[in-house]
Structure formats: C-alpha cells, structure tokens
Amino acid sequence: MGLIKFLKEKFKGKKHEEVHEKYVAGLDKSCANFSSRLKRLEKKYVAINSDYFDDLEEILIESDVGVRLTSEILNETEKEAATRHLDKPEEINELLIDKMFISYANRGEDIKTDVQFVSSGPTVLLMVGVNGSGKTTTIAKLTKRYQDRKKKVLLVAGDTFRAAATEQLEVWAQRLNVPLVKGKENGDPASVVYEGVKKAKDDNYDLVIIDTAGRLQNKSYLMDELKKIKRVVQKIIPEAPHEVFLVVDANTGQNGVIQAKVFKECTDLTGVVITKMDGTSKGGIILSIRDELGVPVRFIGLGEKFDDLTEFDLDNYLYGLLLGGEEE
Ligand SMILES: Nc1nc2c(ncn2[C@@H]2O[C@H](COP(=O)(O)OP(=O)(O)O)[C@@H](O)[C@H]2O)c(=O)[nH]1
Ligand SMILES: [Mg+2]
C-alpha cells in the first residue's frame, strides 16, 4: 500500500483539525505551501515529462529539502515511475511522498522522539545552537512538558556571556517554578555547569537541562567550550550528557543545515529541535537536517509560549505536507 493510502486510512473519519490539532495548525504555512504547489502542478500537466520533474525539483529545493536529497528522491521517483509505467501527475506525487517517507525512515534506528530518561540518577540534557535559534525558549517548553509528567527538573544557565541570557532563563524558571543554577556574568560556564549537575545528583533531580552560549564565530573555540562542558559533566556523571539537542531555527533554511554540520563536528548530537515552524513556509528543512546530519528531529517549536512544542511525528508531518489546507 502506498503511503498516501496508508495515511488516509490512518486518519480516516477524523476531521482535519482533530488529526492535526496544534501540530499542523502551526505547520500550516509550510504544509499549505508545499501541497498547494504540488496540486497546482498536477493541474498544469496532463501527463508527465521531463519538465514536470524540473518543476518538482524547484518545489523541493524551494521548500528547503536540500539539493542532495532532492536529487536522490527525484531519481528514485523517476526510476520507479518508469518501471511501473506511471505517467499521471497525481501518481507521481504520491510516489514522491512515499520516497520522502522512506528516505527519512531509512536513515537510522527507530525514531524515539521523547527525552530518553536513564533509570539511575539525573538525566542530563545539553542544549546547543546559535544565538537566537530558540534554545532558552525550548528549554522552558521542555521543562513544562516534563513537569507535567511529574519529573523534578533543574535548569542550568550555562550561557554566561550575556547577562540577558541568564535573566531570560531566570524569568522562565520563576514562571515555571523550577530552580535555576547560575553564575556570574562572564564567569566560566564550565563551573556553573559543574555546580548544576552536582546539585542535580545530590538532590535527586530527574532531569537537568543545561543552556549554553551559541557562539559560532570560531569553530575551535566552540569545540573547546563544548568539550570542557562535557568534561565537567562527566566528572559527576560519567555517562552524561545523555542527550544533546541542537536547536535550529527553521527560517535559516540551508544556512541552518550548514550551522548544524559545524555543531555536529564539535559534539555528539542525539537530536535536533526545529523551532519557529509556525512562521516558515519551508518545512523541508526537517528532511534535509535528517539527511545531512543523520540525526533525528525530536521536537518542533510552533510558537513562543511554553506549550508550543510538540514531538516530531513523521506520519503527521507528511500528511500535513500532502493535504495541508485541504479539507477532508
Ligand atoms: N514564533 C516562534 N518564535 C520562537 C520559537 N522559539 C523561539 N522563538 C523566539 O525566538 C527568539 C529567540 O529565542 P531564544 O530562546 O532567546 O533563543 P536562544 O538565543 O537560542 O536562547 C525569541 O524571541 C523567542 O520567543 C518558536 O517555536 N516559534
Ligand atoms: Mg538563550
């Protein structure tokens, strides 16, 4: 069974809003953009030809799917269309979405999105990413999520380079009523991190989330800093950090993918959070990041409030891309 059929079956009988709830409400822009462009293309061609694939290529690239992945997906689509003698635009587009699904799902292990908690001691989650990508906001969202699940959460202000960064985290910490470990402005982030992780262990926290500065101006500097933070964490909990999430702003498009690669060279990542999906019409960055980094997207940010975070769900995402804006 093709993916579209599968998704339609899966979501059959459900109203558009029920299926997607907040998820696709936030994604609407990118979904509507992508799916309406595919639909327009279906109307423009009676049967496919090479121009059709050129048009498809343009749509994929402009949706930030990435050049390499776009050409892979299109090659596979073209090949299979030829062997199955498909020449209707709708059939090709269904095949295309199938290939997008396969390419995402094939790239690795089972996709677990939720933070993976360890059974003994605090789970340490390190947040990295450039300034403005949404790290601090995402920390607040994750805090709320796990508080709601009765986890005891501690925050660590490892971004000591801007006073405003610590203040911002402090505001969230107060609002969410969680303790925050912070240091002096321009102090050594590693010492704040040490103190924070030690407190988490001594006081039996379930989850400790560490905010970091996202200074990317100098790669070797970034690498040293992240190494140092890791080292002090491991002095207290040798297996930590258990999770390292890279936060990427969806609006940065292919630039965001390049940034992500630099971070990946500097530290082991366990997941990516794509923020500001509510404000972009280019949802393809999710596929592109997965393709170029081999790291799964775990969460997506859909707004500025602490409830505006959702686990990434591939079925839902592709269903939205496909049928976004269409009332079923
Ligand atoms: N619309 C929208 N704005 C977001 C989202 N996540 C973060 N922001 C905004 O992006 C800006 C930078 O976020 P911040 O958490 O300070 O980034 P940081 O520098 O990486 O810590 C802030 O104005 C946030 O409110 C999101 O998912 N959607
Ligand atoms: Mg910040």
Image (cartoon, helix red, strand yellow):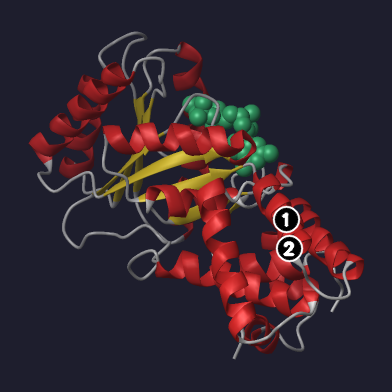
Closer-to-camera residue (127/118): 127
* Type of amino acid at the residue the image marks with label 1: Asp
- Quadrant position of ligand 1: top right
Q: Which residue is painted at 87% across and 69% down in the image?
A: 45
Residue 79 vertical placement versus 124 (above, below): below
Closer-to-camera residue (18/248): 248
Residue 267 point in image, percent of width and height: 27, 37
Residue 155 can be seen, yes or no: no
Q: Secondary structure at mark 1?
A: helix
Q: Which residue is painted at 39% across and 23% down in the image?
A: 213
Instruction: Check disc 1 and report the residue beneath it.
Output: 54
Q: Is residue 197 left or right of residue 322?
A: left
* Type of amino acid at the residue the image marks with label 2: Ser
Q: Is residue 61 left or right of residue 28?
A: left
Q: Disc 2 beta carbon < 8 A from ligand 1?
A: no
Closer-to-camera residue (200/25): 25
Image quarter where the N terminus lies is bottom right
Label 1–label 2 contact, CB within 8 A? yes
Residue 309 vertical placement versus 236 (above, below): below
Q: Which mark is residue 50?
A: 2
Residue 192 point in image, percent of width and height: 25, 23
Q: Which residue is painted at 42% across and 56% down in the image?
A: 296
Residue 164 point in image, percent of width and height: 51, 15
Q: Secondary structure at mark 2?
A: helix
Badge 1: few (under 14), some or many (20 or more) residues near its Cα, within 10 Å?
Answer: few
Q: Which mark is residue 217?
A: none
Residue 271 point in image, percent of width and height: 38, 50
